[in-house]
Image (cartoon, rainbow, N blue to C red):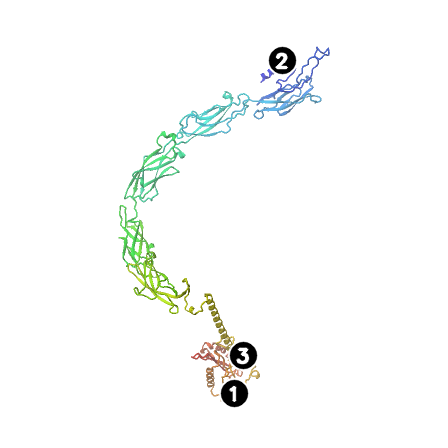
């Protein structure tokens, strides 16, 4: 750089005698200029000679080295104008990018220096503006001009792999030159200046397996038939160096992990040629009895193995499938094993790849074969019945103990243990059957009825004697066969009618029959009249041959007035081995019909109704008659109710009707409210006194009271009155109270009235009232409570009902 600057200064000195900048001017620059004084030749004559125009600013670009490490500021260049005469009258100013901070200028000399180290990768150039001004007045001497300071690049950045480390994959067994991947390194230096950014690639580690193109960075395989099963992962170290790979260039490295991907280049192989398996004979069909495996060095779908049993000796008894997780061959039992029948099986199994690669067919067949030997182990098994199920037939009502069949079971093991039989009680809850435990014969234990249970399903259990835990079961179906024990009968009660206008040979009813013995589909019935071969006058039975028959008229002109109902016996026979028959009677009514045979009425009374009345009119007439009858019944009931109410005025029960007067006596001093004489002498009783509780009749004669002048015997008086009342037909039909109003005369005990009774009298015992029955219980209670203050009592008796519907009467007696 120093030599270049000196050369430029020397060239300027040769072409110009004035001062100039050390760099060439920028192309297209419009340079400012000034005129010098006249030449010596023309100065005297005043004539104008040739004048040379000079440039004011002389520069193009300035360059500064990056990463300058000197202690002094780095010199960039010098600014100068032709107006500067060296008299220190011109001052230089600098402005723009980094002026004052990065770049500084000497205002007198115009020298430019860089104050700090610069990095081209951070900023490649700086644009500044310079101007010359008068040092005293600061008046611009020249217009402001712009120039550029470029940072000159040095090789200070090594190439870098921005995306490393890398991962790549290439199929195994690939040929030489197979593309793997491309790597690219980036250099931050200036690619337009020197070789600082020209990168060359090379392999430091990974040979001789891979190679790299020095210019493009493309990596390819360098060896053929690289086997993944030998080595799967390769680590390759790639270097990128600038300066074209020359000595002194900077370098960067990256790592590439290259994996060989699998291809199907290896067949499956069994680890041994013969596999031995042991299987118990009790193994269930469909269960796994063993596992074998063929190993394949490949991975993924290239290692998937298919197993097949080669047709041969024991291949039909077994099957084989592939476990998708570990590629094992699972041998499955296809048919039941029996140690006593066959003790060993041998067959071959072939293992092959499911996905083949045609590029490697020349490597040989991609399959392998192994032999499997299976030994059957003996297991103590339960007995085996000779049949999977049994069916037996028995007629109903077969006597108890009849053998209907037998079952047979056998122990097939080498020990050949005896077998015992039994019936599962859950399948025969009612114990209809029994079984011989040794022979296995099944017999009836109860009488069977097909109509109750037509089929019995029982379970027979066979048990080994030497190992009772081992049992087996078999289903036995017992069909109860029918015997002809029920005679046939009509399927339903028929309501048969014949029209008065019926013709000879007309079918008036189709009948059918039923039988409880057999199902309906298997029945066969025949119908006939009991007088078969004898000519009847009115009807006959015609068998249609399809389990139905018809009732046929033998004449016409039926009249309801002559005979309304006819009875026709029908004989029905079934088709059993032992024919049974029954006779049923059909009731045939003679009815009126329309012209088309539709039923109108079967009532005999309808004959006498006026012709032309419709059914609706007849119904209306019947309804009116019913309404009238209801009205009459209601009227009679109301009249009877009113008559009963006139005979009853009390609110009490009609059987104990007592007339209440609600009169309170004023004592012996009160002679106005009540005639006390009547109580003292029966002679003053009026002759025409009638009973107030009944309505008197006109023809009834008054009853003369019978008195006793001498008070001879009160009993006779009471007996006479009682006879009168018992024979009185005017008495009401319920109990009533009669007061005889008699007081004896000349009694030694004087008056019995409570009014005149003394306080010092002895109390009378009324306990005997309790002995008269429940009807006197209330009276006994009253007199018992008031024994000290009351001496009156009443004796009430009840008359008995007469045998010929006479009215009941109660005749109370009152002793006052």
Q: Position of residue 734 (x, y in %)?
A: 48, 78
Query: Answer yes or no: do the residues labelled 1 and 3 have beta carbons within 8 Å?
Result: no
- The kind of secondary structure element at disc 2 is helix
Name the one closer to the observer, 362 or 418. 362
Query: Residue 14 got which mark?
Result: 2
- x and y percentages locating residue 593 in the rendered image: 41, 64
Q: Which residue is mark 3?
A: 661
User: Is residue 177 something one can see in this rendering?
Assistant: yes
Tell me how far mark 3 sits from mark 2, CA to CA: 183 Å
Neighbor class of circle 2 (other Cα within 10 Å; few <14, some 14-19, many 20+) is: few
- Left or right of 46, for residue 801: left
Determine the CA span between mark 1 and mark 2: 206 Å
Which is more toward the observer, 575 or 221? 575
Q: Label 3 crowding class (10 Å Cα cut-off): few <14, some 14-19, many 20+?
A: few
Judge left or right: residue 201 versus residue 9: left
**Residue 441 in sight in this render:** no
User: In 3D space, how far apart are the residues under numbered discs 1 and 3 (Cα atoms)?
Assistant: 24 Å
Tell me the number on the disc at residue 683.
Answer: 1
From the viewer's perspective, is 68 left or right of 763?
Answer: right
Instruction: Look at the image and tell me in which quarter the N terminus lies.
Output: top right
Q: Secondary structure at mark 3?
A: loop
- In the rendering, at what x and y percent does residue 311 appear? 31, 38
- Viewer-proximal residue among 615 and 773: 615
Q: Quadrant of residue 359?
A: top left
């Amino acid at each position: 750089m120093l030599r270049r600057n000196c050369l430029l200064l020397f060239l300027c000195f040769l072409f110009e005698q004035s001062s100039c900048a050390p760099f060439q001017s920028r192309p297209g620059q419009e340079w400012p200029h000034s005129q010098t004084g006249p030449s010596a030749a023309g100065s005297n004559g005043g004539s104008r000679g040739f004048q040379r125009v000079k440039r004011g600013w002389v520069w193009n670009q300035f360059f500064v080295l990056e990463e300058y490490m000197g202690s002094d500021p780095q010199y960039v260049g010098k600014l100068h104008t032709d107006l500067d005469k060296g008299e220190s009258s011109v001052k230089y100013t600098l402005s723009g990018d980094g002026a004052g901070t990065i770049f500084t200028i000497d205002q007198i000399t115009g020298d430019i220096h860089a104050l700090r180290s610069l990095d081209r990768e951070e900023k490649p150039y700086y644009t500044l503006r310079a101007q010359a001004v008068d040092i005293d007045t600061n008046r611009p001497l020249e217009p402001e001009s712009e120039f550029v300071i470029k940072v000159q690049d040095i090789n200070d950045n090594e190439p870098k792999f921005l995306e490393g480390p890398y991962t790549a994959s290439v199929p195994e067994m690939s040929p030489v030159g197979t593309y793997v991947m491309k790597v690219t390194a980036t250099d931050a230096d200036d690619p337009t200046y020197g070789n600082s950014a020209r990168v060359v690639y090379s392999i430091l580690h990974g040979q001789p397996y891979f190679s790299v193109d020095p210019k493009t960075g493309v990596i390819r395989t360098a060896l053929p038939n690289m086997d993944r099963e030998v080595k799967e992962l390769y680590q390759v170290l790639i270097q990128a160096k600038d300066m074209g790979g020359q000595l002194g260039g900077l370098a960067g490295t990256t790592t590439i992990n290259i994996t060989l991907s699998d291809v199907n280049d290896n067949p499956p192989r069994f680890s041994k040629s013969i596999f031995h398996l042991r299987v118990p004979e009790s193994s269930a069909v469909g269960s796994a009895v063993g596992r074998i495996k063929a190993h394949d060095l490949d991975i993924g779908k290239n290692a998937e193995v298919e197993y097949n049993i080669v047709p041969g000796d024991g291949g039909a008894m077994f099957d084989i499938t592939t476990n998708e997780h570990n590629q094992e061959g699972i041998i499955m039992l296809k048919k039941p094993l029996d140690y006593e029948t066959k003790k060993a099986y041998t067959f071959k199994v072939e293992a092959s790849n499911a996905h083949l690669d045609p590029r490697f067919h020349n490597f040989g067949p991609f399959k392998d074969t192994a032999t499997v030997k299976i030994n059957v182990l003996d297991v103590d098994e339960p007995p085996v019945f000779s049949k999977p199920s049994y069916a037996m037939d028995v007629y109903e009502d077969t006597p108890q103990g009849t053998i209907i069949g037998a079952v047979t079971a056998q122990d097939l093991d080498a020990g050949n243990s005896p077998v015992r039989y039994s019936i599962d009680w859950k399948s025969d809850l009612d114990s209809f059957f029994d079984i011989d435990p040794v022979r296995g014969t099944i017999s009836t234990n109860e009488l069977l009825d097909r109509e109750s249970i037509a089929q019995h399903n029982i379970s027979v259990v066979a048990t080994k004697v030497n190992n009772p835990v081992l049992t087996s079961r078999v289903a036995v179906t017992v069909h109860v066969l029918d015997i002809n024990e029920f005679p046939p009968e009509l399927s339903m009660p028929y309501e048969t009618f014949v029209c008065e206008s019926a013709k000879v040979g007309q079918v008036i009813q189709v009948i059918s029959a039923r039988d409880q013995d057999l199902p309906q589909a298997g029945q066969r019935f025949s119908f006939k009249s009991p007088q078969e071969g004898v000519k009847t006058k009115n009807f006959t039975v015609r068998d249609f041959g399809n389990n139905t028959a018809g009732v046929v008229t033998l004449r016409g002109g039926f009249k309801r007035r002559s005979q309304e109902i006819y009875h026709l016996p029908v004989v029905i026979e079934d088709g059993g081995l032992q024919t049974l028959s029954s006779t049923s009677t059909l009731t045939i009514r003679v009815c009126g019909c329309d012209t088309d045979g539709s039923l109108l009425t079967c009532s005999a009374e309808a004959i006498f109704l006026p012709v032309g009345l419709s059914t609706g009119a007849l119904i209306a007439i019947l309804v009116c008659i019913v309404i009238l009858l209801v009205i009459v019944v209601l009227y009679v009931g109301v009249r009877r109710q009113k008559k009963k109410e006139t005979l009853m005025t009390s609110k009490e029960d009609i059987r104990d009707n007592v007339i209440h007067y609600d009169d309170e006596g004023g004592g012996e001093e009160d002679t106005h409210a009540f005639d006390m004489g009547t109580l003292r002498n029966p002679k003053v009783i009026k002759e025409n006194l009638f009973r107030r509780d009944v309505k008197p009749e006109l023809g009834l004669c008054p009853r003369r009271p019978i008195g006793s002048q001498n008070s001879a015997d009160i009993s006779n008086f009471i007996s006479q009155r009682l006879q009168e009342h018992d024979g009185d037909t005017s008495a009401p039909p319920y109990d009533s109270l009669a007061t005889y109003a008699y007081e004896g005369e000349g009694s030694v005990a004087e008056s019995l009235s409570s009014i005149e009774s003394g306080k010092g009298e002895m109390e009378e015992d009324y306990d005997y009232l309790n002995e008269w029955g429940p009807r006197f219980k209330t009276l006994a209670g009253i007199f018992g409570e008031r024994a000290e203050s009351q001496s009156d009592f009443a004796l009430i008796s009840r008359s008995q009902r007469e045998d010929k519907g006479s009215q009941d009467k109660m005749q109370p007696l009152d002793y006052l």
